[in-house]
Amino acid sequence: MKNPEHRVNTTKKLLREALMEMLKDKPLRSITVKEICGRAGLNRGTFYAHYSDVFDLMAQIEAEMEAGFLAALTPVLTDERMSPPRVTKKVFQCLEQNADLCRVTIGPNGDRAFAIRVIGKGREHCETSCRRLYPNADPRNIKTYFTFVTGGCIALMERWLREGMKDSSDVLAEAAERIMECGIRYLE
């Protein structure tokens, strides 16, 4: 007999996969619990044991990704020796683990508000750290730098997803780190 926690995780994974597949073709508001369950091969009672509706399922998926993303940024705020570009590897690994949600978020049926919220929180973390590492830097320059870096990382992620994630998250993170390290001289 399988572990009950394993069964719950498998159920949630199936529901997530079904929802992500459906979001490629239509907006969240047009998807029903019945459709998700049919695609996942589960009954509606199983769905309702974990989620109140389709929006709750999506909210929990987004919350898990956001928590992972912010956890990847935590070293920037807590380690005096950690510069913002060094966290890139963990961030891109989080994006890789949530590639299905990233694809949907940047797609035509995606929730741009979610992407903007997560990116904004990430930028705040990095700007806070940068103010500590570069106390003499003009705060406007810090905002300018992270606006540029954020836009570049989003473009890299979009291309990476569009091209089928052929490079590993480590390769992508290393490229982004090298670009950011060259650009961070702007703050000196």
Image (cartoon, helix red, strand yellow):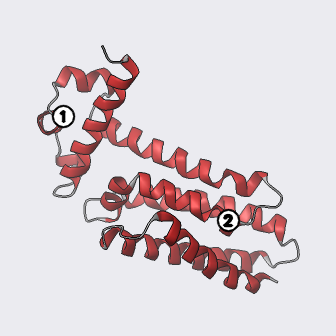
**Residue depicted at x 68% and y 58%:** 125
Name the amino acid type tagged 1: Val
Label 1, on which residue?
33
| Name of the residue lying farthest toward the front | 1
Which structural element holds mark 2?
Answer: helix
Residue at 88% x, 76% y: name it. Answer: 136
Please identify, in this view, whether the residue under mark 1 or under mark 2 is nearer the observer: 2
* The N terminus - image quarter: top left
Left or right of 177 on screen, residue 102: left
- Residue 5, above or below 23: above
Residue drawn 55% across the image and 69% down it: 173
> Could you tell me residue 187's position as x and y percent?
77, 82
Is 148 placed above or below 85 here?
below
Residue under pointer 2: 86
Question: Label 1: few (<14), some or many (≥20) within 10 Å?
Answer: many
Along the line of sight, the residue nearer the viewer: 160 or 109: 160
The answer to which quarter of the image holds residue 61 is top left
Q: Amino acid at mark 2?
A: Arg
Q: Position of residue 91 (x, y in %)?
A: 55, 59
Relative depth, front residue between 155 and 90: 90
